[in-house]
Structures are given as C-alpha cells and as structure tokens.
Image (cartoon, rainbow, N blue to C red):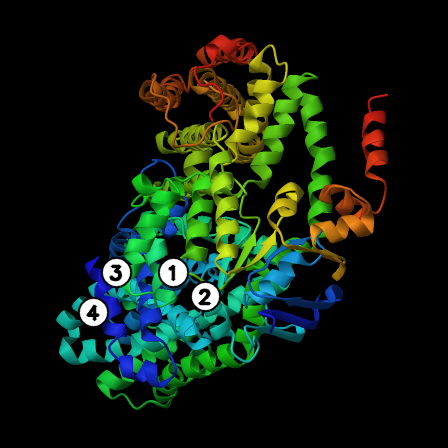
C-alpha cells in the first residue's frame, strides 16, 4: 500500500547510519514490511468493539486508522473558535491531542508493543538484537505517525489560515515533543497496570480502556458541541501562573505563545523550556528506569513463564462468584436444564472479554443518551421530570425504553462465542427441551444487564416524581421484560454460545433484526400515547404482564424443531 | 568426532523454581534425538535455550563449535525450529510469511520462491499459498510452520511436537521426511509426547524429568536397562510418581 511504502521509504533513508550501528537493513526492511502488511489487516481501536459483525477479513486498516484520526483531528479545530485567547486555544488543542492520542494508543499500542508471536517467530531466526530492536522502534514510529499526522492536519490547516505559516511551523515544532510526552504517559500507565495487577489480567484491563475509548468518542461528539453552545468559554482565559506549569498541555500552549508572539513572560518562557525538556526527560526515564522492568513484564505476558505459574487469586475470584450466581439462579429458575443454562450464561458473560467488548459499549451509549436528554431539556431535566412536562415524560420513557438496546445487544451476543465448538455439550447431552437452556441464558442476561439499569431508573423516577409514577414505571418495566422475551423467542434459533458471527443464519435474520428494533419503538410510542390515562395504563399493565408470562413460557418450551441452527463444526 | 550440540551443566530457574538442574548433553551430527519427559520436566526450556529464546541460563551451550552466548546469530543460522504451538502471523499468506522467513535467513529470492512453492505443493497447500492463514486449520498452519523451519536447509532441526494437528497422510510425510533428513546428515532434536513415534524415529532417546536427564541411550539400550518394554512403559516406569494402573482403578471406582 502507498502509505506504508511511503513511511518505509522515509524511515529507511538513513540506511548507512543503521548499517554503521550494526543493523542488518535487509532484515529490517523484511520485518517492517511484514509488520505493516499485518497492521493493514488487523482491527484498529474502532474495529475492536465492532469486530466480527461481518466476517469479511479486514483490509486497508491503515487507511481506516488515518481517516479516523483525521475525523478526530477535525474535533480539535473547535479549540481555535471557542475562545479568543491564543494560549487557551492551544491549551485546549494540546489537551485534546494528548488525551485522544493517549486513548488511541492505549488500545492500539498493545498490538504493536506486545506481539507475543515475535518471540516464537522472529527471535529464533538469525537476526541480531539491534535489528530486532530498531524494527520494533521504527514500527512504533510508523504507527504513531499514522495517528499523529492526520490527527494534527486539520488543526495545522486552521492555524495556517488564522496565524499564517509562522504559526504552523511552531505548531509542527511542538507536536513531536507532545507526542513523546504522550508515549511516556502510556508507558507509565502500562507500568502502573502491570504493577497493580497480574500480566494475565493486563489485556483485560486494556480491553476496558478500549471500551471506555469507544464510549468517550461517541460521548464527545454528542455532548461537547451541546455544551459549547451554552458555555461561557468565549471570554475564558487559561491562567498563566506558576501553578499552570503543573498542567502539561500548558507547556506546549505556552511554548507556542512564546515562539509566535515572542511573549517573554517568565511563565511562558518556563513553559517553553518545559515543552522541550519534559518530553526529553520523560523519554530518558522510560529508557533508564521503565524499559528494563517493562520488557521483563512484557515477557511475562508473552512468555511461557506466566502460563506455568498458577495464579491463586484467579481461582479464588472465580469460586467467589458461585454462591451469588447460584442464589440468583435458585430464585429465578427451575432446577435442571434451566438452572444450568442460567449459570452457564452468567459465568461466561462475566469472564469472556469478547462478550464484554461487544456489550459494554452499549451501556456507555445509554449513559451518553441520558446526558443528552438532560442537556436538551430547556428548564433543566430534574424540573421537567418532576413536573411531568412533555419533555419530562420523554426523558422518563426514553430512559426506560432505551435500555432495550442494551438488552438487545446482550441477548444477541449470548448466541456467539469464539469457543462455539464447546457447545457440543448441548448437542451431546440428553436435553429433551432446549428451551429450558435458552430460557436460563435469557434470564441470566436480563438479570445481569437489565435489572441494575431498571432499578436505577426506577429509583430515580420514584425519588424525583414520587409514587404517582409507579403505574407508568411498572408498565415500562413489564413492557421491557416482554420485549426481552419476545426478542429471545423470535431471534433465538440456536443454543447459547453456539455460533461464530461469521456463520450467518440466512433464514429471516433481516426480518428478525427489524422486529427487534420495531418492538421497543412501538411499545414506547403506545406507552407515550396513553401516559396520562391511568385506567389504560393499568389495563395495559395487566395485558403486558400476561404477555410476559406467556412469552417466557414459550421460550422455556422451545423444542429442537424450533431451532434453525444445529451444531456448527 | 566433535559433537554438534553440547550442553554443559545447564541450569535455569524461574524465580525460586529451578527448571533445569544441570543438564549435560553431547549430540553428534546426523543423530535423531528423541527428547522426552513429562509436562514441566524442562523440555521446552531446553529447546528455548537451544533456539536462543532464553539467554539468562547458567552453564555452556555450544552448537557446531560456536558458543551460544557469544554468537547467538551464527547458531540460529544453523538451526531450524518448529515450535510446539502454531505460532505464526496468520493474517499473512503462506507465501508472505515464508517470504519473510527467507529474507531473515538471507536466502536469495529466486531460490526462496522456488523452494516455497515446491515445499507447499509437497504439503498439499499449493492451492492455499496465497490465502490468509487465519482461515487455515491447525494442521495446515503446522505444515506452514514445518516448511518455515526447513526452508533454509538447516544442519540442526528442532521439532517440538511437529505432528500436532496433522492428518494421517501428513504424519507419514513428516516421519518419512525425518528419516530422509537424518540420512542426509542433519541432526534432529525431536520433542514429543507421542512415544510410539519417538520410539520409531529416534536413534537416541533422552528422557528428562524434574530438570535432570534420567535416561539416555538408544531404544534397545533403554530396553536392556529397563526390561523388554515399550517406550511408553519405560517412560511411565521412570517418571510416574504413582502407579498409573492404580490411577485408572481409582477413576473406575468413582462410578461405584
């Protein structure tokens, strides 16, 4: 690909320098070429939470990463328009830059830094340490450049228009130290995570960062523009005091101000010195103090050493889940297959990183939605809710029915597993009614992903509005349960965790998807129309409760002939 | 004759745990060595030391007269390694992956291209050589790994469970290949739990347990020492902490 070839060409220009250092440039080029091809075919931070929704192999991931970085970079332009003070403008720019670059690197860096396969594939080959290390370093440089260049491009153009060539040159001069400082932050964070947790849990924690990143991006684009309209940022000036020197983005903002306006205020001069010295110092700290233990820890993640040692804390934490899950299972399921289905789904949804990656962002999006609803109300969300105005009713119903999308996401995902072949247990054991297992799994998902959210919304509703909201609350919850079981009944045509997402069910999957979306929307609309008619609410509540009982029973009694997908080999 | 591989008092510990407790081995060129032992005995650690994956060991390792610690790159050039797990960059195609391996061993491109094509064809992978390996079965990946270990025609071949995941026909090919490579003067260091295969292909069997060599000799010599038994029984006799027959009985008792 052109972009990869371009980076490769540029970075291999000082060939003779590398050769003088003892690097084998043929090996270096071969490793980097392979790594860049792999980067192109590997999911990036955006793909991480969406992967496997289609089974097509990923191509051109580099282009995707760069486009996404440009998209993020467009967001930075806001910095130059919401305030008149240039120090504040650049302070905001560098805050966004450091924060978003760090967030992106946290999720993507693991693949670059910790490719455990290098140990088995590259290290036994006759390449010298210097070549291997330089290959890794240059791979990181290319990876970071692919993010930083497009991320800063929109701001460089904007600064060029506002402040001319001189402004652009000074910004270009300050971006590399800001990047180095961000890498230091990531490194320090990795070291911290590795210090407080086991190497085995490291990747799980990084996964949570990836989830948080996906939510953050979604939230930023939804919420920040709404905040800006209302804020008094236009006349805000970031204080140029000694205390500001404790805030890293100020170093770079102050540095730009010093260079561009030749503003010789002492704080700005110190900020400029810090903008160059601190990244240099931080990289020295990384090399001198972090790198040795870091490499050792990375080896523990990647090497066999970690797998040879049994971590007793994992064993304890896993066994601690049992009494709680079993108590819940005893409360909500019948003994036998349903209980087994419940516990099986409960444990897997707790421990599968892939499942969390696909479902947890939906919960984050719900929170973002709630914030948006609150921001959109004119008088203030609490007042609107308390007075049960039109907007207040919409916020309340939105809160209740938007949970559907979380539970739909979770219910959809409990069909899939990377270890789908383990579902042989369902097909080889003498289960006469598979619906029992499905019902158990559905109940586990509802209790785990719906109940906490429903309880939160209920408590908020009763606290803010009072008990007069109870009929609507109960109807909303009953409708939710009805939706869950209806979706389970319509869309569950296989055993839980028995499919890969690459295996598509052709028969009616589109229709099932549409129904899954229409049902909650339809119910919410109907609920809104009868919101103030207590008799109608109570009548519908009775109907809805009966429907829950009937549909849950239908799920429980699903037979083998109702299932459209058998064991996938 | 100077040994091609020599290990003198090799020790290796992970923290407090000593994995190798003074391994001494002297292996001549052209031998097929069956290197066996129970899980955790230290087999993989020995292999990783030989391949240059672990460098913080005590003792001396010499390969073809070269001290491993002093010149690991030259040693690696002489070794072909097929790891236990199908570790490869599976988003690459076999041609891309093996192309990278060829570059790292400095094999001229025309030779590498020709060799890759011939070897993949022999392994029945010709039609898949330009497909990404993430869709391959374990056996197909294993065939690519074996090809990568042999691509540079090394003097020493280290095979760690090479038959894992292979179909019956491929197993026959690899077993036959081992014999032919040995006849060609290659030294083969073969680690496996498949005792019947080790028994058949090895000139010499080294049994390691708890970081120490506990038996070393040809299959006939081991039989002479331990009674006229199969390698499986000799292995069990030397390494099992309790009677395996009793363990089976205990399992059966669980149904009572």
Q: At which x and y percent is residue A242? A: 44, 83
**Are labels 1 and 3 assigned to the same chain?**
yes
Quadrant (top left, top right, bottom left, bottom right) of the C terminus of chain B: top right
Q: Chain of mark 3?
A: B
| Marker disc for residue A125 | 2
Q: Chain of mark 4?
A: A
Residue on which disc 4 sits:
A156
Q: Nearer the viewer, mark 2 or mark 4?
A: 2
Residue on which disc 3 sits:
B110
| Quarter of the rendering containing residue A506 | top left
Residue A228 visible in the current orientation: no
Q: At which x and y percent is residue A363? A: 47, 39
Q: Nearer the viewer, mark 1 or mark 4?
A: 1
| Marker disc for residue B101 | 1
Q: Are marks 1 and 4 in contact (CB under 8 Å)?
A: no
Q: At which x and y percent is residue B70? A: 55, 80
Q: Nearer the viewer, mark 1 or mark 3?
A: 3
């Amino acid at each position: 690909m052109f972009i990869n070839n371009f980076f490769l060409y540029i970075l291999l220009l000082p060939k003779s320098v590398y050769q003088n250092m003892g690097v084998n440039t043929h090996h270096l080029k071969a490793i980097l070429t392979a790594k860049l091809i792999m980067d192109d075919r590997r999911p990036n931070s955006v793909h991480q939470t969406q992967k496997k929704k289609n089974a097509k192999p990923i191509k051109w991931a580099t282009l995707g990463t760069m486009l996404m970085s440009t998209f993020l970079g467009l967001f930075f332009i806001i910095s130059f328009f919401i305030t008149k003070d240039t120090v504040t403008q650049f302070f905001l720019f560098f805050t966004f830059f450091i924060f978003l670059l760090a967030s992106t690197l946290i999720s993507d860096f693991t693949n670059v830094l910790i490719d455990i396969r290098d140990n088995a594939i590259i290290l036994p080959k006759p390449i010298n340490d210097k070549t291997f290390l330089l290959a890794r370093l240059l791979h990181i440089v290319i990876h970071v450049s692919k993010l930083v260049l497009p991320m800063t491009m929109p701001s460089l153009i904007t600064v060029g228009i506002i402040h001319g060539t001189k402004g652009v040159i000074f910004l270009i001069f300050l971006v590399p130290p800001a990047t180095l400082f961000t890498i230091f932050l990531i490194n320090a964070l990795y070291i911290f995570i590795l210090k407080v947790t086991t190497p085995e849990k490291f990747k799980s924690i990084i996964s949570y960062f990836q989830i948080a990143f996906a939510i953050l991006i979604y939230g930023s684009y939804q919420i920040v523009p709404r905040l800006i309209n209302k804020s008094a940022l236009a006349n805000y000036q970031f204080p140029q005091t000694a205390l500001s020197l404790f805030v890293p983005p100020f170093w770079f903002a102050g540095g730009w101000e010093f260079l561009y306006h030749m503003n010789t205020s002492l704080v700005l001069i110190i900020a400029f010195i810090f903008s160059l010295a601190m990244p240099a110092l931080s990289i020295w700290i990384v090399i001198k103090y972090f790198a040795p233990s870091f490499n050792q820890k990375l080896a523990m993640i990647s090497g066999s050493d970690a797998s040879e040692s049994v971590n007793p804390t994992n064993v304890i934490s896993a066994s601690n889940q049992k009494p709680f899950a079993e108590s819940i299972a005893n409360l909500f399921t019948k003994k036998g297959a349903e209980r087994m289905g419940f516990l099986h789904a409960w444990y897997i949804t707790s421990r599968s990183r892939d499942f969390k990656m696909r479902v947890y962002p939906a919960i984050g999006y719900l929170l973002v939605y709630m914030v948006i609803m609150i921001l959109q109300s004119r008088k203030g969300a609490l007042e609107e809710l308390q007075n049960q105005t039109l907007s207040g009713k919409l916020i309340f119903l939105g809160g209740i029915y938007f949970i559907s999308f979380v539970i739909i996401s979770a219910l959809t995902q409990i069909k899939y597993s990377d270890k789908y072949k383990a579902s042989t247990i369902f097909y080889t054991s003498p289960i006469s009614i598979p619906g029992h297992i499905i019902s158990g799994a559905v109940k586990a998902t509802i209790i785990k992903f719906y109940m906490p959210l429903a309880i939160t919304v209920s408590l908020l509703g009763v606290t803010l509005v009072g008990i007069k909201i109870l009929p609507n609350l109960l109807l909303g919850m009953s409708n939710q349960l009805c939706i869950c079981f209806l979706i389970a009944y319509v869309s569950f045509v296989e055993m839980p965790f028995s499919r890969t997402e690459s295996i598509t069910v052709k028969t009616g999957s589109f229709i099932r998807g549409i129904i899954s979306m229409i049902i909650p929307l339809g119910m919410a609309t109907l609920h809104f129309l009868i919101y103030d008619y207590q008799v109608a609410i109570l009548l519908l509540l009775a109907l809805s409760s009966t429907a829950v009982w009937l549909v849950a029973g239908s799920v429980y009694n699903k037979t083998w002939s109702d299932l459209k997908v058998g064991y996938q080999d | 004759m100077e040994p091609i591989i020599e290990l003198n008092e090799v020790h290796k510990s992970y923290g407090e745990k000593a994995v190798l407790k003074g391994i001494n081995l002297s292996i001549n060129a052209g031998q097929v060595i069956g290197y066996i032992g129970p899980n955790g005995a230290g087999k993989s650690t020995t292999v990783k030391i030989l391949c240059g994956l672990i460098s913080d060991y005590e003792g001396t390792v010499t390969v073809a007269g070269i001290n491993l610690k002093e010149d690991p790159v030259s040693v690696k050039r002489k070794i072909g390694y097929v790891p236990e797990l199908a570790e490869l960059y599976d988003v690459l195609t076999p041609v891309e992956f093996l192309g990278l391996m060829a570059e790292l061993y400095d094999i001229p491109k025309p030779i590498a291209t020709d060799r890759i094509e011939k070897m993949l064809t022999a392994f029945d992978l010709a039609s898949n050589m330009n497909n990404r390996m993430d869709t391959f079965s374990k056996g197909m990946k294993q065939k690519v790994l074996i090809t990568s270990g042999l691509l540079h025609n090394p003097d020493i071949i280290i095979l760690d469970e090479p038959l894992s995941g292979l179909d019956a026909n491929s197993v026959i090919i690899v077993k036959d290949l081992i014999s032919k490579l040995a006849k060609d003067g290659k030294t083969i260091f073969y680690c496996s739990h498949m005792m019947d295969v080790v028994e058949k292909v090895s000139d010499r069997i080294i049994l390691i347990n708890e970081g120490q060599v506990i038996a070393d000799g040809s299959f006939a010599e081991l039989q002479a020492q331990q009674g006229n038994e199969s390698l499986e029984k000799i292995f069990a006799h030397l390494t099992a902490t309790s009677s395996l027959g009793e363990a089976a009985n205990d399992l059966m008792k669980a149904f009572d």
